[in-house]
Amino acid sequence: MDYIRLVNGCLKKETAAQRELYAHFAGVMLGVCYRYTKSMTDAEDVLQEGFIKVFKNLHQFKGSGELGAWVRKIMVNTAINYLKSQRNYQYDLSYFDNSLHPVSDDNPEILLSTKELAELIRQLPTGYQTIFNLHAVEGYTHVEIGGILGINEGTSRSQYARARALLISWIEKKDIENKTGIYARK
């Protein structure tokens, strides 16, 4: 895809170029938004708000990096801002230093499908889910996460470790259930 042509068309307010840019990135970016929210409706809201920001700020895209990465960064920032602004996520984004789950450095050797792992990550409390996604999926450092979320680096590290430990315990439980044929009731 010729991104330079597409960006130039969008900057000239060409509807066809805007539609093409949206169509090209919307599916993937909806997945990004969904990773940070707890419902598809919220993810769609974030996606729409994110694309408004993309089109409004497209003049800032210099073409030196990948357009998809630039759009993704806007979507992640929009999702974080959405979580901060929504009353139903306010409490979930409170970061406490008290331990809810033991921290573990175990590395389970259990194979899960990508879909199963994504669903487990979505079941994390919102704060854990947000930090886990920012660090493990998006590649942000704990210093960067601290700046984004307004927390200190140590809190980011501990919340990530707790999220990871919780995921490991769920994965191990799932593996035991699969091996024994016992399935937990939901």
Image: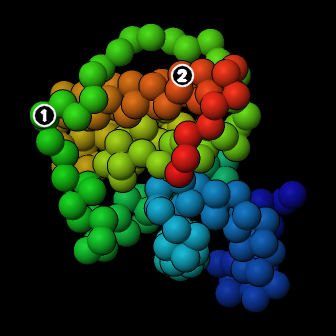
**Relative height, residue 38 to residue 164 (above, below):** below
The residue that label 2 is drawn on is 172
Q: Return the residue found at the far right.
A: 1
Horizontal side of residue 186 vs 128, given as left or right = right
Q: Amino acid at mark 2?
A: Glu
Dot 1 or dot 2: first in sequence order is 1
Residue sitting at x 48%, y 24%: 168
Q: Please provide percent x and percent y for residue 49.
A: 49, 77
Secondary structure at numbered mark 2: helix
Q: Report if residue 83 is visible in the image.
A: yes
Residue 126: x and y, percent?
A: 36, 53
Residue 81 shows up from this direction: no
Circle number at residue 48: none
| Real-space CA distance between mark 1 and mark 2, rounded to the nearest whole angstrom | 24 Å
Quarter of the image for residue 82 reads bottom left
Q: How is the image coloured?
A: rainbow
The quadrant the N terminus occupies is: bottom right
Identity of the residue drawn at 60% across and 21% down: 176
Three-letter code, disc 1: Asn
Q: What crowding class fits label 1: few (fewer than 14 Cα within 10 Å), some (14-19), or many (20 or more)?
A: few
